[in-house]
Image: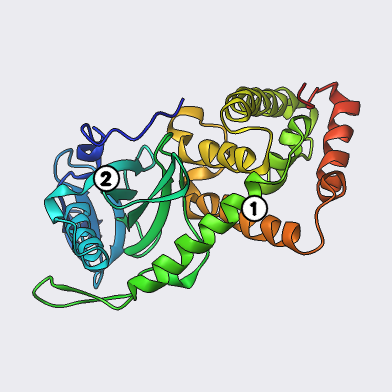
Amino acid sequence: MSQEIDFAHPTNILEDVLFPVKLQEIYSEFRFPATLFNQQIFTRNHKAVVNQKSGEIISIVGSNYKLISNKEAIEMGKQIFTQLYPEVKTNDLIPYKIVAPLSKASAHIDLIHKDVNFSVWEQETWLPYLRTSNSYNRTYALSFEIGFARKLCSNGVLFNKKTMKLKYLHSKGNRIELLTDSAQIKATSDLFIKQCQSLRNYEFPKELMIPLIFQILNINLELPEAKQMTKKLNYLRNLIEVVKVLTDRYFTELGSNAYAAFNIMTELVSHQDEYKNLTGFYFNVRSFYTKPTDWMDDFSNKISTNGVVIEKYLGETIKSLESVKTQTKLEWMLN
């Protein structure tokens, strides 16, 4: 279960993604028919990215691939954060969350500072964090973006907004020149506050949390063939049970409203290292982190314009859940 951000004790798994790496030439053995001897042949167009600590080959890349270690990427991220927030000292930034698959071939590293924050209302504080994304297997290019994290539970979100993906120049002397205007970040935080307040004012029926979560996180409700049915139902039951526990917790803490529902979504996404119940999460980390804010944008706009009839809004997902229930007796509605 999530806990309040502990600024005195940063995440202890940072070292897991800071192992030294290097590019290494690749050779293959070839037996020449004339001599029957094996000879090593140099592979010109590819190199191996090697974990120097374990000796493991992480990936094979092109010979012109530019390798940037996670340690170097973090230092670049710190430069960017302090340019956005000049009052912050580089050494005071802490890593509060690491999102990485077991292979550690890629990593999302989140840096935060306790004094850089804003309140959506009294005693409800969020903090901007800088996410550094880096990979050794070409999953994605090195990138930096700003997200927001809730102080009381460490749930984080990202945005599908160009202004939050940071543009920069990287000089040969490893100096970073930030091209993004910090005023754009402030505009997004102001809109975020407004939307949080809008969600808080919308009463949300507890019994419909399952269809909301399944709809926003695109949970597949198609039933498989018989031999895969038990696995599928166990997966759905686990997810339903976790949502039930989180709904009781957040609705008690925040009230029966759409802001509580938003926090249930962000909890699920932010703590997959614990829950492990979102299929394909580590292949689509950024997509999952933006789903709650995409919903926030859409739902708060609907609230402010024509209003929302929630049963109609969730109609197709409710229909799919009822179909699953009819075929498998899977209970989904929360009490």
Nearer the observer, 47 or 31: 47
Residue 306 rendering spot, x and y as whole percentages: 82, 62
Q: Nearer the viewer, mark 2 or mark 1?
A: 1
Q: Quadrant of residue 297?
A: bottom right
Which residue is under mark 1? 198
Residue 292 rendering spot, x and y as whole percentages: 58, 50
Give the SS element for disc 2. Answer: loop
Q: Does residue 323 sit above or below 285 in this rendering? A: above
Nearer the observer, 131 or 304: 304
Name the colouring of the figure.
rainbow
Locate residue 3 relative to residue 54 in the image: left or right.
right
Please tell me which of labels 2 and 1 falls first in the chain.
2
Q: Which quarter of the rendered picture does the C terminus lie within?
A: top right
Q: CA distance from mark 2 to mark 1?
A: 26 Å
Locate residue 107 relative to residue 9 in the image: left or right.
right
Which residue is under mark 2? 114
Check disc 2: other Cα within 10 Å, few if <14, some if 14-19, many if 20+: some
Residue 11 rendering spot, x and y as whole percentages: 26, 35
- Name the disc covering residue 145, or none: none
Task: Tell me what residue is drawn at x 12 percent, y 50 percent.
Answer: 91
Give the SS element for disc 1. Answer: helix
> What amino acid is at disc 1?
Ser
